[in-house]
Image (cartoon, helix red, strand yellow):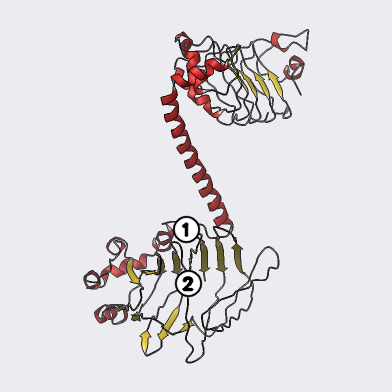
Amino acid sequence: MAVGALGVLIYPLLQESLFTCKRADRPHIIKDILKIGNLWCFTNLTKLQLDNNIIEKIEGLELLVHLVWLDLSFNNIEEISGLDTLTKLQDLTLYNNRISKIENMDNLTELEVLSLGNNEINDLEMIKYLRRFRKLKMINLIGNPFCEEEDYKSFIVAYLPWIDYLDYAMVKEEFRQRAIESYQISLDDLTEKEKKKEILKQKEHEMHENYLQHKEAYVEGLNDDTLFKNMYEDDVEGKKLNEMPGVILELAGYPFPICSYLTYNSYLSIYLSIYLSIYLSIYLSIKDSVIKYLYGKYSYSIYLSIYLSIYLSQLVPIYLCIYLSQLVPIYLSIYLSQLVPIHLSIYLSQLVPIYLSIYLSQLVPIYLSIYLSQLVPIYLSISISSYLSIYLSIYLSQLVPIYLSIYLSQLVPIYLSIYLSIYLSIYLSIYLSQLVPIYLSIYLSIYLSIYLSQLVPIYLSIYLSIYISIYLSIYLSQLVPIYLSIYLSI
């Protein structure tokens, strides 16, 4: 709907007095409009002509989202503003105003015709701002102070080579080529900067999309360096770790580095790296003196982060982070040789089955298949209760993220028992072709015992309280991330 009868339509709405119009089809004779206002009801307006007035500021156009043609020439406008919502605008006339800077038009991506002639623009470099409008075909800049420069037309055509008309004259192809050649070096530099900026913008967009995806899967924050900070920062009990005599001195002599959080934030972080190669055996253990502090006469809350890296074939880091509260007895002894049979038993809280509820927008069956080299059967039993939900999303092909989030809102003790028959050996084979990081974070009550055959004990007994959070990421072949997060609260 064009404003052919603007005098009749907006006369009672304008805040300033208007001259009476005898001809409603001649909007240019309307005078003395000082402020644009009361146009909110004309949401379907596509054409608006407010030239030859005394308007000082562009405003009141926010709801005219269908506007295609806008004429604000011959006014007293000093700044380009108030156009952010006019994304469909194709023709904008700001001729003969007091504008000194080209700005605030980022959202006008459909702009084809722009008139900024007879304004107060001094800096010819501002023309570079218009490079974002790739649909721009016609531009009028005549009458601005920078037009006194001899080569201003060459500059404009060089930096806006897609325009067809400049200052009411068609741009000839020969002139366009000469202009581009004259500014080729600076154009190349600017183009390179624009490409980098576009790549950065694309990455930010992808990060935002990933964040929204993670948020929908209830696993936001698990893929950045704030995970551990968010887990521990409010635990005042962790400060007691620094009060344990001799702990820092004992750990200082170990071959693996201790995280700096130990001194400042009372976080005990242990980094263990295991490199597996043919016929390579590695023994890892914790000194008895440390165990006495952790398990003996002292009873303190401990925040223990263990980072375990195992390198197979390619670089395959595995990060294991465990949050411990109350007494933390740890007996750790690992013997790695060629084929190591493993018997795994996990005991959590009392003898209570796992209560889980699976919600996948529809009733979606889940098939879990595990292949262990000697066809080791695994029995998994799940009972379902209320107030619990699992959000599982699986994306296959190239980057394959799997998001698993479990939220338990009631007091749900968990008893998980994986029993592998006596004398049964588990051979776990992982094929690695790219960097394969696995992130595992546990944050709840867990009693964990692991035994290796041939009387090679691994005693890992961990007592945690209240919360559990598991963050598991596996990258295979084409960098396939798997995110597993479990959050339990009482």
Image quarter for residue 400? bottom right
Relative to residue 274, is residue 75 drawn left or right? Answer: right
- Mark 2 or mark 1: which is in front? 2
Taking the spot 70% from the left edge, 8% from the top edge, the residue there is 29
Residue furthest to the bottom: 422
Residue tagged by mark 1?
223
SS at circle 2: loop
Question: Residue 194's x, y, as percent?
Answer: 47, 33
Image quarter for residue 85? top right
Q: Which of 182 and 262 is in front in this view?
A: 182
Question: Residue 258's x, y, as percent?
Answer: 28, 66
| 251 in relation to 447, above or below | above
Q: Which of 446 and 192 is in front in this view?
A: 192
Question: Residue 483's x, y, as percent?
Answer: 52, 63
Say whether marks 2 and 1 touch (CB < 8 Å).
Answer: no
Relative to residue 276, is residue 21 drawn left or right? Answer: right
Question: Residue 212's x, y, as percent?
Answer: 56, 52
Residues packed near mark 1 inside 10 Å, few (<14), some (14 to 19) or many (20 plus): some
Residue tagged by mark 2?
430
Residues packed near mark 2 inside 10 Å, few (<14), some (14 to 19) or many (20 plus): few
| 423 in relation to 357, above or below | below
Q: Distance between the residues labelled 2 and 1?
A: 23 Å
SS at circle 1: loop
Q: Please, what is the three-letter code of the amino acid marked with disc 2?
A: Ile
Q: Taking the image as drawn, is residue 77 in sight?
A: no
Q: Which of 297 and 370 is in front in this view?
A: 370
Q: Please, what is the three-letter code of the amino acid marked with disc 1?
A: Asn
Q: Residue 443 carries which label?
A: none
Q: Nearer the viewer, residue 14 or 252?
A: 252
